[in-house]
Amino acid sequence: MTGDGHCCLVSLRTIHRILWSEGRASTSRVDGRGGESSTGNTLVCGRSSYHNGYAMSATLQKPDWVEARAYQRRAIASWLDNGGHGILQMATGTGKTVTALQAATELAQRLDNRLALFIAVPYQHLVDQWAEDLDDFGTQPVLAYQSRKQWQEQLERELVEFNMGSRSSVVVITTHDTFAMEPFQAAIDRVSGVERMLIADEVHHLGAPHRRDALPESIKLRLGLSATPKRWYDDEGTADLFDYFGGVVFEYGLEQAIENDDLAEYYYVPHVVELTPDETKQYMALSRAIGKLISKVEGDLSDADLQGHQELKQLLFKRARLIGTAANKLERLESLLSQTEQVKHTLVYCGDGSVDDSVSGETKRHVDATVTRLRDNLDINAHRFTARENQATREELLTEFERGDLDALVAIRCLDEGIDVPATQTAYILASSSNPRQFVQRRGRILRTHPGKEYAVIHDFITIPQTEIDPTLLDDDQFNAERNLLRKELERVATFAGAARNHPDADIQGIPSSSGPFSLQELKRQYNLLQM
């Protein structure tokens, strides 16, 4: 860009002219996964296609079996009409990936298939998933993650070929962290012309200070994807992100998706679980310590944004683990499952911490203690699904779960973003982040449609203070700590209950608890939360 910004304006005008100069290409409906790659007779070296020793152009081509749904066509049109800028705010499970690839394909056609496409995703396993989807669209992308030695040479070679005109397009998938690094930024700047596009999956992650500072102005075509693009308690990060990508240009919410049968209906069943006396004391002590430090933090209260605040980060982790692994949760889960006639296609979300396992008498990770209980006490074929399982094991577990050979998957966070388990019929959420992004994404994954799946059932474990304690006897710090815990739990309940098939009955006037029938209405009154 020149000092007066003219280069940028010319580029944007050029893009607008291109996008408006041709009629919209027809799009089609996503009926399933399948079809053959259109790469022709090629030899794959790394992930770059070659034919007779010459690099082949990896032109995006929509597979015959893909037919865009009506809302996906509207999303693509909205983004194109906005000059190739904008965020698609679409509920988890409604096909953001395939919508983005169709948008890129249509754009490439309008640019005479002259396009350098950069795709940034939050996690390494999502790089591989996007690569599989791109294979269906007839292209072999460069996978730029892990060691730079594994991808830099290939990327530089393809960019040289692109600039020389011997390659009409180049597609690169990377992680958000690698995308923000100087070597990758330098590679972006090597591209000649304005034919550059960025697809940012789970775009909210790019609003972290160290990532948003690296968003390249040289890329003029920008598409963000997220079910929850607004950053939690980070107005500045959200504003910068929306300014860069052009704001939300299309929304397709969960309730609308359920109404249109694009997601399954669901029943919501909350269960109250009380902290033990010792857990309550620990929670209040941690909350007081956190309160003294939290005012010093700028930005979203996520792991990525707590750099330089290690003490606060550790306290937040410790408190989250305390709530997630509350002792009464496993007892309640075992009780519920023992009353279930058949446990099949079931997900269990656990806390990230350790507990004393009553079965073995040992201290175990919460996820492992849960698996042990399901297997040994209830004869349920369960397996953990965590970061400790390699990619091959994960794929095998998902296949067994899909077939019904594996009754239950027990996870911590690995199923939060990007991994599809549409066969899921029942979910037990023992632990949730207070960040609404997590439970909104979890719900969307549980509600993906699947043959024979009429609806899903979500069991949510609500953590509350000890009910036998009279709140009027607490000092101000104790009262506020307990009130904040209850408020955060009720915010999640309201979100889940609002779109449930059994709403308003799910909206907790009286619900089960670990100590018998219980009414949260009275607890709301005691803690001045009747407005929730």
Image (spheres, helix red, strand yellow):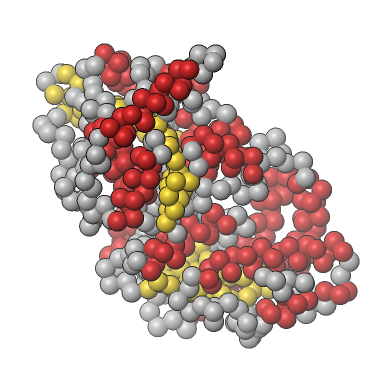
Closer-to-camera residue (336/222): 222
Residue 367 image offset from top left, x and y in percent? 52, 60
Which residue appears at 64% of the width and 40% of the height? Answer: 236
Counting every numbered tag in the picture gives 0
Residue 467 image offset from top left, x and y in percent? 74, 78
Which residue appears at 36% of the width and 25% of the height? Answer: 14
Q: Is residue 476 left or right of residue 422?
A: right
Residue 379 image offset from top left, x and y in percent? 41, 75
Task: Quadrant for residue 143, please give it.
Answer: top left
Task: Quadrant for residue 106, please give it.
Answer: top left
Furthest residue toward bottom: 517
Evaluate whether residue 10 shows in this view. Answer: yes
Which residue appears at 24% of the width and 39% of the height? Answer: 23
Residue 246 image offset from top left, x and y in percent? 49, 38
Task: Quadrant for residue 343, please give it.
Answer: bottom left
Q: Is residue 198 left or right of residue 482?
A: left
Q: Is residue 25 above or below residue 513?
A: above
Q: For the C terminus, which image quadrant?
A: bottom right
Q: Is residue 153 above or below residue 209?
A: above
Evaluate whether residue 141 shows in this view. Answer: no
Q: Is residue 298 above or below residue 7?
A: below
Closer-to-camera residue (172/364): 172
Q: Is residue 41 left or right of residue 399?
A: left
Which residue appears at 22% of the width and 42% of the height? Answer: 25
Closer-to-camera residue (423/368): 423
